[in-house]
Amino acid sequence: MASIITERFLLRNFTIDDVADLHEILKDPMVNEFLPWLPSKSIMDTKRFLTERVFPEYEKAISYFYAIEA
């Protein structure tokens, strides 16, 4: 997907550079309460999540994993 840029935010694909920021979100049990995966316990868990779950989705015609920058 091409990035979408508006006056208020940037919507883009995740990159490996996002692992630390994504880990801050994925390690929170409340954030992940209703998601189909368990909270991340380490940066390596988050990196594995990106490489095994998110990045393969970008090969498909439609993907729903996007980073939002405000």
Image (cartoon, helix red, strand yellow):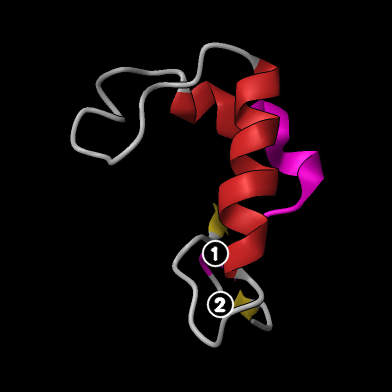
Q: Could you tell me if the residues under marks 2 and 1 are in contact, i.e. CB atoms within 8 Å?
A: yes
**63 relative to 17, above or below:** below
Q: Which residue is mark 1?
A: 9
Is residue 20 located in the magenta-colored stretch of the structure?
yes
- Identify the amino acid type marked 1: Phe
Q: Along the horizontal axis of the image, is 46 left or right of 26?
A: right
Q: Which residue is pictured at 66% across the width and 34% down the height?
A: 48
**59 relative to 30, above or below:** below
Is residue 18 located in the magenta-colored stretch of the structure?
yes
For this orientation, the residue located farthest to the right is 17
* Label 2 Cα neighbours within 10 Å, binned few <14 / some 14-19 / many ≥20: few
> 29 or 68: nearer the eye?
29
Residue 65 in percent (x, y) is at: 50, 60
* Label 1 Cα neighbours within 10 Å, binned few <14 / some 14-19 / many ≥20: few
Residues in magenta, as a range:
8-21
Q: Which residue is mark 2?
A: 6
**43 relative to 69, above or below:** above
Q: Along the horizontal axis of the image, is 18 left or right of 37?
A: right
Position of the N terminus, as image quadrant, is bottom right
Residue 33 in percent (x, y) is at: 21, 28
Residue 22 in percent (x, y) is at: 58, 34
- Identify the amino acid type marked 2: Thr
Residue 34 in percent (x, y) is at: 18, 36
Q: How many marks?
A: 2
> 59 or 6: nearer the eye?
59
